[in-house]
Image (cartoon, grey):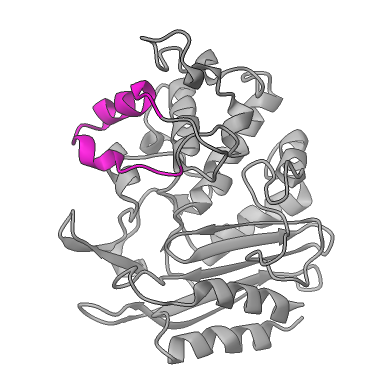
Amino acid sequence: MGFDAAFDLVNEWVESGRIPGAVLGVLDPDEPEPRVRAVGLAQREPDERPMTTDTWFDLASLTKVIFTTPRILDAAAAGILDLDGPITQVLTELRQFDPEAWQRRITLRDCLTHASGLPATFPVYTYGTDPDQLRAFVIQRDWPHGDPAYSDLNYMLLGFVLERLAGVHIRDLDAGDGFAWSADPAEAAATEYCPWRRRMLVGTVHDENAAALQGAGHAGLFGTAASVLAFARGLLDGTGAAPESIELMRTPVGPRRTYGWEHPYEGWSGGEACSPATIGHTGFTGTGLWIDFDAGRAWTLLTNRVHPTRWSDSGVIELRRLVADALY
């Protein structure tokens, strides 16, 4: 396995200034323990802090696949939810003032596979400051119907489903072993200076909508390379979710997607050398996780590519593909 070659690429990106820092972690069947290595800075501004293998990252959209997807699928496997039933089986008040509204026909399966037709995203956080009022806004809004697209709104709704089943907000739910909904700023990778919150974000969620909702199904989870790889190991050895759930996570539902995850396609983030039985997902802050079931291998590349601003050319899309191919 080309771990050293892959890490040399990550180091090259850091030395060129394209990303402040990164942690690369690989779980391989020939190695008893994961290999994890860090480089660069966890924070560049206003003060510098080094990146370490124990640095906590805002995992951004990895929340969708590490937290929300397994819990929804496990609830379905347990008979608590019907994936083909409308989301109104739990969110009974969805678009309640229009019984014929198309949104009331959206199923859990539609949301999991990004087939609902809901918009990709929306600045929900600009519509108020009360998190429960914002939940009602999302649930009651007459969203336009479009072509199927990768959508944060799909996973906001799935997060609301989990909240409704548990009777508490997501931030009051157990984030999972090795995960949390925030992190100690002294131990976390900084993300971005936020004009809305007027501060550098460190240890608090980067995604504005997740912040305004005070917990959401599409973003907000924090973790380390070790915790991300431990989650991957659970899927590889079958202990991390119900067997039916893992099978669906691996099942293609189109040219790019499975349930929650992506599978290999030309130009995808997991490179060209992995097996067809690979799933992966990335996060806006610069994170990513890929799991190759045929090879028994998983790898995570965690970067703070949005620090101090998202408006720079980090080249992280290219880096992900190069790292993946180097590992093989």
Task: Name the one closer to the observer, 111 or 59.
Answer: 111
Q: Work out which residue is located at the far left of the displayed protein and give it.
A: 198
Horizontal side of residue 217 vs 239, given as left or right: left
Q: How many marks?
A: 0
Horizontal side of residue 134 vs 167, given as left or right: left
Q: Residue at x 66, y 56 (%)?
A: 232
Residue 132 part of the magenta segment: yes
Snapshot quadrant of residue 227? bottom right
Q: Position of residue 126 (x, y in %)?
A: 22, 41
Task: Name the one closer to the observer, 209 or 146.
Answer: 146
On the question of residue 154 being in view, the answer is yes
Snapshot quadrant of residue 41? bottom left
Vertical relation: 299 (above or below) 122: below
Q: Residue at x 29, y 66 (%)?
A: 192
Snapshot quadrant of residue 197? bottom left
On the question of residue 52 being in view, the answer is no
Vertical relation: 251 (above or below) 271: above
Instruction: State the quadrant of the N terminus.
Output: bottom right
Residue 185 part of the magenta segment: no
Q: Position of residue 92 (x, y in %)?
A: 45, 12
Residues shaded magenta: 120-143
Task: Name the one closer to the observer, 205 or 223.
Answer: 205
Q: Residue at x 50, y 19 (%)?
A: 102
Horizontal side of residue 193 vs 19, given as left or right: left
